[in-house]
Image: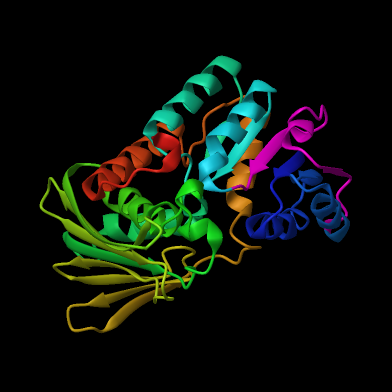
């Protein structure tokens, strides 16, 4: 399948390195607002076409799937462009600015009959089913409490601190903690509470978000843009606990009993980068004329955006594009 990348930043480079190692994938085109940047990118990865506008990529008749790798603030605009030109789309997380934009994308996708999915890689990884199988096996008994954290030293990045680019910890790293709980604990949430520390620029820098589930389970996720955390996820049950090494890209999953004795250790399967799973699923769906992701259907993306909308409402945080 011939794939194009819209955007030529850091994520685009990881994608390109992944795709050139995949079977049945041809990285056919790349687009940037800067033609020289697109040409350099294409040269580095031996890509056939380089475009100096996103419109040219969207109109390329040979491109079958476009990966959108631009800031959150522009996802809606760029997805709309691609979908209106009949292109299948994988869009970087967070899917949109808010749930309203996500709903509009779903409506447009249904109308144009193209595949559109959020490229949040943890939803597609084998680790998802490994963790869920452990939880459902009863190896740690009934889960009553869970924690997750994801923090990086990224406050020097303009994309992160600029409100106009939908910056902040929530949409960039917080989305992983939220998805971690939804994937493994479900969606039957009674209420959500949060605390936040804002930057001088007006976006969230650090936060703690607590999910209170209807079955009594409590789950707390924390995020920051000021330093690298251990990125662990922990599930606590009445018979033991599970520790996931790196909720952003699980490497090892360990199970302990109530005496802290390690009773199981699972390494996830070897991978190229982790991005290959979402690309492969997109290709499989498109080839079978299915317009909905199995791992991350648009209804789930809308649900996640609703949660983040509600959290931002608690903080009175509004992006400039929403004003």
Image location (x, y in percent) of residue 70: 61, 47
Quarter placement of the C terminus: top left
Image location (x, y in percent) of residue 75: 55, 39
The colouring scheme, among rainbow, by chain, secondary structure or one colour, is rainbow
Image location (x, y in percent) of residue 83: 63, 26
**Is any part of residue 209 visible from this angle?**
yes
- For the residue pair 126 and 108, the one nearer the viewer reads as 108
- For the residue pair 141 and 92, the one nearer the viewer reads as 92
As for residue 68 lying within the magenta part, the answer is yes
As drawn, 280 above or below 286:
below
Among the 4 quarters of the image, the one containing residue 188: top left
As for residue 158 lying within the magenta part, the answer is no
Image location (x, y in percent) of residue 16: 73, 55
Q: Residue furthest left?
A: 216
Q: Which residue is at a point 56% across and 40% down the rendered structure image?
A: 74
Query: In the picture provided, is 270 more to the left or to the right than 178?
Result: right
Q: Magenta segment, which residues?
A: 45-70
Query: In the picture provided, is 69 more to the left or to the right than 134?
Result: right
As drawn, 196 above or below 188:
below
Q: Which residue is at a point 65% across and 42% down the rendered structure image?
A: 67
Q: Which residue is at a point 41% across and 69% down the rendered structure image?
A: 151
Q: Which residue lies furthest to the top in this view?
A: 111
Q: Which residue is at a point 49% across and 59% down the rendered structure image?
A: 160
Number of numbered discs visible in the structure rendering = 0
Among the 4 quarters of the image, the one containing residue 86: top right
**Is any part of residue 1 visible from this angle?**
no
- For the residue pair 96 and 165, the one nearer the viewer reads as 165
Quarter placement of the N terminus: top right
């Amino acid at each position: 399948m011939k794939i194009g990348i819209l955007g030529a930043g850091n994520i685009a480079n990881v994608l390109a390195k992944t795709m050139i190692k995949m079977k049945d994938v041809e990285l056919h085109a790349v687009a940037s607002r800067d033609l020289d940047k697109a040409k350099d990118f294409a040269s580095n990865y031996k890509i056939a076409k380089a475009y100096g506008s996103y419109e040219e990529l969207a109109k390329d008749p040979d491109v079958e799937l476009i990966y959108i790798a631009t800031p959150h603030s522009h996802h809606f605009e760029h997805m709309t462009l691609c979908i209106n030109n009949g292109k299948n789309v994988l869009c970087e997380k967070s899917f949109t600015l808010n749930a309203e934009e996500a709903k509009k994308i779903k409506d447009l996708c249904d109308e144009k009959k193209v595949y559109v999915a959020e490229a949040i890689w943890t939803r597609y990884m084998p680790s998802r089913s490994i963790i869920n199988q452990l939880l459902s096996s009863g190896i740690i008994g009934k889960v009553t409490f869970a924690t997750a954290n994801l923090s990086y030293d990224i406050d020097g990045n303009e994309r992160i601190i600029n409100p106009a680019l939908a910056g902040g910890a929530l949409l960039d790293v917080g989305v992983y903690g939220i998805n971690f709980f939804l994937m493994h604990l479900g969606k039957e949430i009674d209420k959500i509470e949060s605390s936040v520390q804002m930057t001088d620029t007006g976006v969230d820098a650090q936060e703690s978000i607590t999910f209170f589930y209807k079955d009594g389970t409590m789950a707390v996720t924390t995020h920051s843009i000021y330093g690298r955390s251990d990125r662990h996820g922990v599930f606590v049950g009445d018979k033991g606990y599970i520790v996931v090494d790196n909720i952003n890209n699980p490497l090892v999953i360990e199970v302990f009993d109530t005496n802290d004795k390690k009773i199981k250790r699972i390494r996830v399967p070897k991978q190229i980068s982790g991005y290959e799973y979402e690309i492969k699923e997109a290709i499989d769906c498109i080839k079978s004329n299915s317009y909905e992701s199995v791992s991350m259907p648009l209804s789930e993306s809308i649900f996640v955006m609703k949660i983040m909308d509600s959290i931002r409402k608690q903080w009175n945080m509004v992006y400039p594009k929403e004003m």
